[in-house]
Image (cartoon, rainbow, N blue to C red):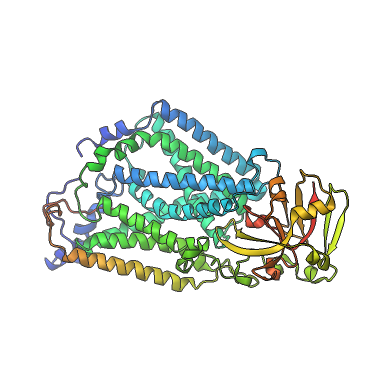
Amino acid sequence: MVRPTRRRTVGDELRAGRTLGDAMEADFGHLAAGPFADDAFPSRLHDERVSAVLGLALGISFIACFLTGLVSHFAQQPLSLGFLSMPASPGWLYRVTQGVHVASGIAAIPLLMVKLWSVFPKLFAFPAVENKAQIVERVSIVPLVAGSIFQLFSGLANTARWYPWEFNFTVTHYWTAYVVIGALVAHIGAKVSITRRALSAEARRAPEPPGTGLSRRGLFVATGGAVAAVTLTTVGQTVRPLKDLAVLAPRRPDVGPQGVPVNKAAAGARVTELIADPGYTLTIDGRVERELKLGLDELRALPQHEADLAITCVEGWSAGAHWRGLRVRDLLAMAGAPEDAEVVVHSIQQRGAYRSSELNVPHARHADTLLALELNGEVLHVDHGYPIRLIAPNRPGVQQTKWVSRLEVI
Amino acid sequence: MSTPARQAARDAPGGPLFWISNAIGMGILVFGVVGLLRHQDATVPLNVLKFLAGSLIAHDALFAPLVGLGSLVIVRLVPRRVRPALQGTLIISAAVVLISIPVLTGRGRNPNNPSILPGDYGTGLLQVLAVVWAVGVIAAIRALLRPPVADDPPRAGTLPPQNGW
């Protein structure tokens, strides 16, 4: 490790009259020993305390990301989930969990980048394993690292609607999450004693390792700065007071028709002609005493209710808005639906994975669950679901069905 | 560094905690793999495998070696006092560049929905980098102006040089 004298640089050698080839050899020749040499990674930051602190931060962000991801997954499932079924209140819950999901994933990117750098020399450790357990441990690093990069990349790309792959994002991101979290649980078990030692009060008081360049504390400040930078430039897509800083976010919470972003436009959903039909009706059927068919004029003549509710996209943006329309529970009562009615909300859309959604009992009965006709004081824009859309508290945006044509009570 | 091998041996994993967490972790991992395989119409496992392998190659064979090469150059060209500020600035810059790649591609843009990717992300990225580098320059100048203090590393020559990969 310790070299006896200061290494002369290429410049020193050239000034001393050596040829370029010899000068290069003198300065860089030792690199020929390759990354397996003892002194191949001389930075003082390849250090167990660095890896432990970054590992802890990364572990927390991954667990937050995983749990909020599960919330979002179950919020998008059909209703027969029992206690896993999404409550209708608090109305802000999904907005927070999904904001945390995307923000913690983005924050994990610099954490993972620096963490992998800090442990990179271990890839070339020799002897590669000390015991049987370490064979298992080193093998489980492969799905951990590959899966982590895969999840962060695919998640980030999805927020920007970039799909350079063939698989279905939602399904694949969900199942791969278990691969990563499983490998993480195994990794925590393998590293818990080193981590405890490296995070102890004694290790915290220990002096910085000798050497030049960034100190350990400096690296933590820089990594924290990187987390702050990527967060501040994106989180405004859901935290509105920070929207003007969100120059790298794929959405602005105030950019879109009527000042609200859109996930699927009317043209993309191929409903432009269907919703222009003057005979547009809303049907309420299924488990009801009397089927109803209501035209738009009849719907506008019914008592209207107002609510402030956020559209919260699974992709991490959200936008609060003021909605006006009919309470779903009033419509259910008109049709004579039972108290325990669950509702499938159908769109007039002919194609697309999200052309219907389901309301569980708490959502169907909530006073703020509306079939909205107006947004921010104007008739709904076609891209927001004109003439009628569902808007309910604490729900992913893809479940806020647009261009509603039918409430099917089940 | 006289006992690196013994240290490594002491730190090698093992014990009941390791095996229990490994069993639980591998159970969760297998659950995920089975899920991926059972939904192969949606997950296209071969394509996923390609991206998983690509993730490893992109980091281990591309990104990490490039960082190493960059360090090799910086250690030789940049004055020692400026180096910490430069390292910090580069870490933050790399993070910001990495997270803006998907929006910079603009591949998600959709003519019938202008609320997707509404920004000019090239300009946005340059603005962010300008702020980051301005802070970096201030930190570097402060480091240059700061008088030497007791816990400063000694002058070059008395410490082993920082060469290597």
Q: Looking at the picture, how far across and down is residue A78, in whole percent?
A: 70, 46
What is the residue that sits farthest to the top in this orientation?
B16
Q: How many marks?
A: 0
Q: Which residue is more in the foreground, A334 or B141?
A: A334
- Residue lying at 42% horizontally and 28% vertically, measured from the top left: B17
Q: Is B31 located above or below residue B80 in the figure? A: above
Q: Is residue B54 visible?
A: no
Q: Looking at the picture, how far across and down is residue A81, in whole percent?
A: 67, 40
Q: Quadrant of the N terminus of chain B?
A: top left
Q: Looking at the picture, how far across and down is residue B89, in whole percent?
A: 32, 63
Question: Quadrant of residue A355 in the image?
Answer: bottom right
Question: Quadrant of residue B15 in the image?
Answer: top left
- Residue lying at 35% horizontally and 55% vertically, measured from the top left: A223
Q: Is residue B13 visible?
A: yes
Q: Is residue A277 left or right of residue B140?
A: right
What is the residue that sits farthest to the right in this orientation?
A290
Q: Is residue B2 left or right of residue A70?
A: left
- Residue lying at 82% horizontally and 70% vertically, measured from the top left: A277
Q: Which residue is more in the foreground, A292 or B141?
A: A292
